[in-house]
Every structure is written in C-alpha cells, then in structure tokens.
Image (cartoon, rainbow, N blue to C red):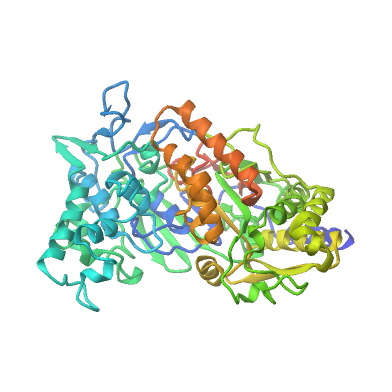
Amino acid sequence: MKFKVFLLALAAVALLMFPVWASANNPNTVIEENERAVATLDPAWAYDTGSGQVLNNIYDNLIQYNGVSVTKFLPMLSTNVPSVKDGTILNGGKTYIFHIRKGVYFHNGDLLTPEDVVYTFERIVIFDRAGGPQWMLAEPLLPEINGSYVDSITQWAVKLAGVKSWDDLFVNGTRTPKNAKYKKALIDAFNLLAKDFVIKGDEVIINLPHPYPPFLSIICHGAFWSSIIDKKWAKSVGAWPGTADTWWLYHNPIREKDPLYSVANGTGPFELERWTAGREVVLKRFDKYWAGPAKIQYAIIKVIKEFTTRKLDLLRGNADVISVPPSFLEQVANVKDVNVSKSIPVLGIYNFFFNFNVQPHSKFLYSGKLDGNGVPPDFFSNLDVRKAFEYMFPYKTYIKDVWYGQGIHPNGPIPKGLLGYSANTPSYNFDLSKAIEYFKKAYNGKLWKIGFKVAVTYNVSDKTMQMAAQMLSAYARKINPKFKVVPVGLLWASLLDNQVSGSMPIYALDWFADYAGPYDFVYPYLDSNGPYGASLGKNFISLAKKEFDPLVTESMKVTDPAKRQKIYEELNLLSYKYATMMWLIQPSRQIISRRWLKGLYPDNYNPMFNKELLFYKLYKK
C-alpha cells in the first residue's frame, strides 16, 4: 500500500511539471495515441483492431449501426436497411435487396456502382487468407456440405474435384491446376458463390443458399472486412480482376505482397494521406463524402507503446485522446481539462481455457503424470478438477483490484448486451470450501494426497492476465501446499502456436465480437469445429459433438428471436454444467481525452467498436 501511495504522489508531482493547456492545439486535427500498430490496409486481410480503426474511417459499408444499438441499423451505402416489413427480405430470410446509393464518390473520383458491392463480397470469399475473417461471409454465402456450414471456398473446390486437400488440385509448388477436371471444379466452386448475386438497375439482390440470422450484422459498418471497395481501382493496382477462371491465383496471398496491403480507396469520410508502418497513419478529410464533410481536416493515429509517453503527450496537448490501461486510470482521473469516460460497454470476454487432452510430452505438463510433479494429458477431462478450478478464482477481487472495477463477471460464453444472455444463468463464484470439496473428490482422493504441478500460460505483455494467473497460483497453494499452478508468460505468437497445437493445459485468452451476434461467441467457444473448441482435445470435441454442436447449429436454423434466446440460454446452462471454461471478465472500455475534444462518447460510440475510434463526428471546442 505504501508503495502504491508513493507512486501516486510521484505521478502527481510529474503532472505539475507539465502545463495542461486550456485551449485546443491544432483545432483542425485530432491526434490519437494508442499501442496498436496497423497490420494491413486491405479490408479482406484485416482482422485486428489496429487495422480496423483505420479502415472504418476510410471505408463505408452497406449499412451502419443506429447509435448505441447492436440490433438496429441505418442506411449507409445502401439507401435502405432490408426488412421483411418492407419486402426487401424475402424467401424465409434468404433473399436481401439493397438499393445502392447514387452519386457516391470513391476517394480517387470513381463513382460507386452495384458491381462494386458484388465484387467486394466475392473477393473476400475467394481471398480466404489463413486465419482471416472470410468464414463470416463464406458461411452465409456458400451452400452447406453435409448439413454443416462451409468456412472456406476451398472446401467446395476439394469436394467437387473429389480430392483430399486443396494442394492436391495443383501442380506441386504452383497454382496451376493439374488437369481440366480440377480447373472446372475450381470454376464451379466460384459459380456457387457468384449465383448468389443479382444486379437489377441500382439494386443488389443477394440470395443466400440458407437463412443466416446475423447476416446484416456481418456486413454492417464496423465489420471492416465487408467494407465496399472500388472494383475498377482494385483491378488497376493488381487485385483479383473478378474472373471465375483466375480466382485461385488470388487466394490466401502473402500479406506484404497483397496489392491492397499499403493502399486504400474508399467512400468514407477520410482518405489515406500517409501510412508509416509501426508508427502512424495520417488521414485527410474527403470533402466529397456523400454524407457531408467531416468537421476536422486531419486525423492522426500514432503508435506509442509506452503509457507514460502517451500520458505526457496528452498533458502537453500533443495528443487529444489516448489509450489507458485500467490500472493507470488513477493517473489521469482528476487532471484538469482531461475527460475520463469509464465503464463503456463492449462485447468481449477474457477467460481461462481448459484443454481436455494436452499433447503428450508437453513441457507445460511437467512430469506428465499424476505423481505430484506434473499432471497427465487428460487432467482437465476430469469434471471435478475443472469445477475445483472454477471455485478457486477470486472473480470479484480480480475485477476490482486488477481492472479497477472496469468490467463485470460473465456467466457464460455470451456477453451481456447480446441475444441469448440471461442474468439468471448460474455462474461459478469464489468459494474455497467448494474448491476443496471437488479437489478431494477428483481421482478418488489421490489428487488431494499427492498434489500436482501444472503451468498456466498467458500473453506475457498482458498484465491483467498475468495477474489472473498469479491469483490462481496463489489460491491453489493456499488450498494445498502440494498444488503448484505455475504462471508462464509467452510471447503472443508462441501463445497462439501452442494454442493451435494443443500444448497448453490451461491458458488465458479472450474473444471479442466479430459481429453483434451470439453465434459469434458460442461457435468459437463451444462448437467442436470452433477456433477454440477444435483445439481443446478429443474429449472436449466428443462432449461438444454430443451436447453443444446440435444446439449451436439449431440456433442458426431458426429466425424467431424468442426461440433463439431459449437455445442460447440452454447452451449457457450446459457450459455451466460441464464447467467448460473459466469466465473471468467482460471488460468495459475507457476513453481518455482532452476536454476540448467533442463528439466522443456517448455521441459517437457503439459497443461493436471495442477499441476503434471514429473521427467523422469529432471536433474541437
């Protein structure tokens, strides 16, 4: 406590050393500083918030969110939001009609056309880069295979050709089809996608092969992979020309060799002035923006890794808005002319994952045996062990002391604010007596007598998850000195590699909404084919196939919100019953800015913009 008081006093002294300007610097420019570098400027590649923020300011989508709602929409590049009521959603939720806005300019002077919309959606599906966002459009736009959604166009090409894998279609080391049959299969796979789209005058009619309830959310502004791009311009810089007989040449490119990697041409309120990779992006107002020009002339996003530097730039007036970790909020909370907006809702969850079957000989298992010096690979297949861990974590203390109260304790895979969430779903709370009860039941009492040693892994740069791992370790030791939960920090790339390979027995990760729909959470967390579920071991996959997969699939087959709500509530209850994951926190967002910056929260915010800032409505006063 004394050390904390000393740090706060030192911070106060530091504030006195730097003037806090009362009037706005650079009234026509807004400068944001955060720690998130841009990975790419291609909407079809981007799947990160650093790139997403830039793209959301450069590009528009067909529709946009209505204020803070995640279920209501407004027109954008489409002059209508399709609905059953007005006859623009037909055929049981499979046909969507969009009226494309006339007179909209791209930044290079080209006019928006319906062909640009079709090209955008076709391109993202054929682009299909490894680990990318393409699955969100592939699932609604491509026909199912054996009753399951198709996440990649390659699945249809492989099926139609009758081969085992994508690489079997091509001459070794090339993108040249081995024979005419395989080339035809590739073309036929594309035609399955192309037949979804009909252009009729200024209308784009999209005929999905099956109903897909969250389709509008997936193409809404904020889902930057669905940003509408200029077909003519894209072709001119070397992107896919839109032809069925060449699409595979543009599939899964190397990021830096992607023609749209470092260039941009949208219809949004700002155009790209300059991108210095790893350092900053400069955006310039687009005066021909269809909704009217922005109030500021320039928006600058700087990558500043150190919080202290960001804070000092804010105090000096060299930055208008900065990112601040929750643990540092006290340093800016009571500073003159600095505005702190806290507890802003976002759609995301941090959690610990249990791997039911770790790869044998993993170093994170230590001895790999139940001998007091390790754990067996199937340690977390034991329900009593999982429940004991669930009760062993101090959720309320973690949220209060580590996140400074900036979040809530989730009760399942669906965050508060989405269809399917229910406050009545039970949750595991901190209860050491129950943790002891389940530890003593596990392995018929053997675990309690001999103890165990297991690694809990996390992203080494994420201090909030480091603290979570340390808390878990401390309480395990408190329960029984023979219980050794060892916190191990890994570099981000290494953490992801070990997650995919199934090498970590218990690890910390998170999931933030790709779009505002519960399927985007239950699928990755609980489905046997989900990004997380598929890597949690054969015993989890077996459980998921029996208990979770049928409900996850059913949730997308019905369109009645009340029926979907019941399905998702059942999934939440099953997740609780089987103690599938430890749900730590649904965090909230903080926006820290100079008070001269206007048009921020709540005027210019939606929960889907978890970390991204939109500059269009901002101004200084």
Residue 50 drawn at (x, y percent): 47, 58
Which residue is painted at 69% across and 57% down in the image? 19
Question: Horizontal placement of 146 versus 198: left or right?
Answer: right
Residue 148 drawn at (x, y percent): 35, 47
Where, quadrant-wise, is the N terminus in this rendering? Answer: bottom right
Residue 38 drawn at (x, y percent): 44, 62
Residue extending farthest left: 180
Residue extending farthest front: 444
Which residue is painted at 24% across and 35% down in the image? 101
In this view, the residue in front, 444 or 407, is 444
Which residue is painted at 48% across and 53% down in the image? 528
Number of callouts: 0
In this view, the residue in front, 294 or 514, is 514
- Residue 612 seen in the current view: no
In this view, the residue in front, 112 or 108, is 112
- Residue 12 seen in the current view: yes
Residue extending farthest right: 2
Question: Horizontal placement of 472 versus 551: left or right?
Answer: right
Which residue is painted at 63% across and 47% down in the image? 578
In this view, the residue in front, 377 or 48, is 377
Where, quadrant-wise, is the C terminus in this rendering? Answer: top right
Picture quarter containing residue 616? top left
Picture quarter containing residue 171? bottom left
Question: Horizontal placement of 556 versus 366: left or right?
Answer: left
Residue 200 drawn at (x, y percent): 14, 35
Give above or below for 8 relative to 349: below
